[in-house]
Image (cartoon, grey):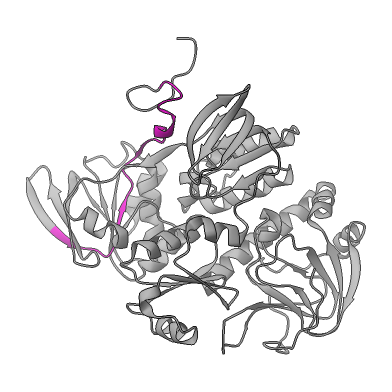
Amino acid sequence: MSTSSSSEVGLVDLPETPDTTGAYPRLSDEQVMLLSQYGERKRLTKGATLFCAGDRDCGFFVVLDGRVQVLQEEGPGGESRVLAVHDRGRFVGDLSILTGQAVYVTAIAQTDVELLEVSYDRLKEAVTVDQALGDLILRAFMLRRRIHADLGAGLRIIGSRYSADTRRLRDFASRNRIPCRWEDVEEDPDAEATLRAFDIPPDQTPVVIWKGKTVLRNPSTTELAQLLGLRAAPQRAAYDLVVVGAGPGGLAAAVYAASEGLSTVVLDALATGGQAATSSQIENYLGFPAGVTGAELADRAVVQARKFGAAFSIPGEATSLAQTDGYHVVGLADGGDLVGHAVLIATGVRYRRLDVPGLDRLERSSVYYAATEFEARLCRQDPVTVVGGGNSAGQAACFLARRSPLVNLVIRHDDLGRDMSRYLADRVEQSPRIKVWHNSEVCELIGEGALEEVVLHELRRDAKQRIATSALFVLIGAAPHTGWLQRQLQLDPKGFVLTGSA
């Protein structure tokens, strides 16, 4: 913990933030007493820092007396923005404390304060004694992450919507549930002001601004991941288990293996959660009768696996598999490798693309293969089109209909319930904002720098029609992501790994 005195820049005398969502609960006296057995009491003077944006392995703080402000650092010449104020009984922290990532906010004593600091390892012990306390903390941290994302806290990405690198950075932040604000140099006046403040020429975009002052010019995803604490360096020469792929299957394997005491490391080329993490609402997953977002499912699984000691390396793209001296060696795209006694392959699938005119030209700016909160914000108030007849397409259409005035759902047959769960098909058909185009397919994309229209081919009438749309979501299934195993393991003609004695 940092306890250095600060110049009270951005320190404002504000009342406690009201708890209207459950993101800022107050602990009971019994819960504080329990945590006191695992933590250390500290007194800090007004203006002292509990932790700063960018810090890792931060403690969990309970305010016993006084007030603490949580701030977002805005950059040169800009005042820090107050996100929350905590007083007696509230706890200070972020989901990053549980996932091992760098925190995105700064916490400063608004007054002289008395705090209870509990380290991550000791907090794990405390919540095993009181499961309700653990659930309360995890839920609050997840809600705070969502609030921070809506406020544009965290990273700032500045670049053109037509830039492939801008899209790459935006997608990486979105898929890893990293709070960020994107400023489009084409339309956002804030982008120009920010570039001037940092003396960055427009031709040097995209840039990432971290902690309000650190500027990364077109960083690789690996550089960004290392900055944020997503990519852990190998802690041992050989692991008991190397899990390749961090979708639900890989995360489940990590939880089970690590809980049995096996040293476990999880790799994924892009993000934890896999395809499931991009789903706005999963209602048929065991144990969540009210449904769960894919992001919450992924975050809960990561916290659970890390609690048992599993390590994560994101991005970590496996490119080869070999055997050496009785060990399995997984080769990585960056030239490194990981050695394990056993390797579990959970690489899942890769999305199928449409083979239509205009896709190559507009894919970088306007075509998406998932519908997360980030994409929904980009499509606000504009008509969008979803292609696909399965559950992923139905969930995406319902989710996007919350923001978009019109969602066109394109399917190639006349029965929405053929490939989609009945409950979801009913919801799609009842939505006044979703128009289902039966027996149709997208045959062309129209637009210059960005998508303006799609051309639909109505199969029964053999007629074509143009419809206005600002974004295309392609959810037409996927193929096994096993190409990297072709020389090491036997695959069937469709790319699935052959198993069993037959």
Picture quarter with the C terminus = top left
Residue at image coords 62%, 68%: 104
Residue 399 placed where, x, y %?
Answer: 41, 57
Q: In the image, is residue 486 part of the stretch drawn in magenta?
A: yes
Which residue ends up furthest to the left in the rendered image? 462
Residue 389: % across, % down: 30, 43
Q: Is residue 2 left or right of residue 200?
A: right
The quadrant the N terminus occupies is: bottom right
- Number of numbered callouts drawn: 0
**Residue extending furthest toward the top:** 502
Image coords of residue 423 (percent x, y): 41, 44
Q: Nearer the viewer, residue 369 or 391?
A: 369
| Above or below, 206 relative to 363 | below
What residue appears at the point 62 percent right and 33 percent down from the top-left corner?
Answer: 339
Report the residue at 36% width, 51% height from top: 369
* Residue 421 in view here: no
Q: Between residue 342 and residue 257, name the one nearer to us.
A: 342
Q: Nearer the viewer, residue 374 or 233?
A: 233
Residue at 57% in and 82% down: 75
Q: Is residue 266 above or below residue 447?
A: above
Counting from the top left corner in percent of width and height, residue 433 is at 31, 61
In this image, 253 relative to 127: left or right? left
Residue 265's quadrant in the figure?
Answer: top right
Q: Is residue 414 visible?
A: yes
Image: 200 above or below 247: below
Q: Is residue 359 magenta?
A: no
Please provide the residue range marked out in magenta.
Answer: 466-490
Left-right relation of 184 to 152: left
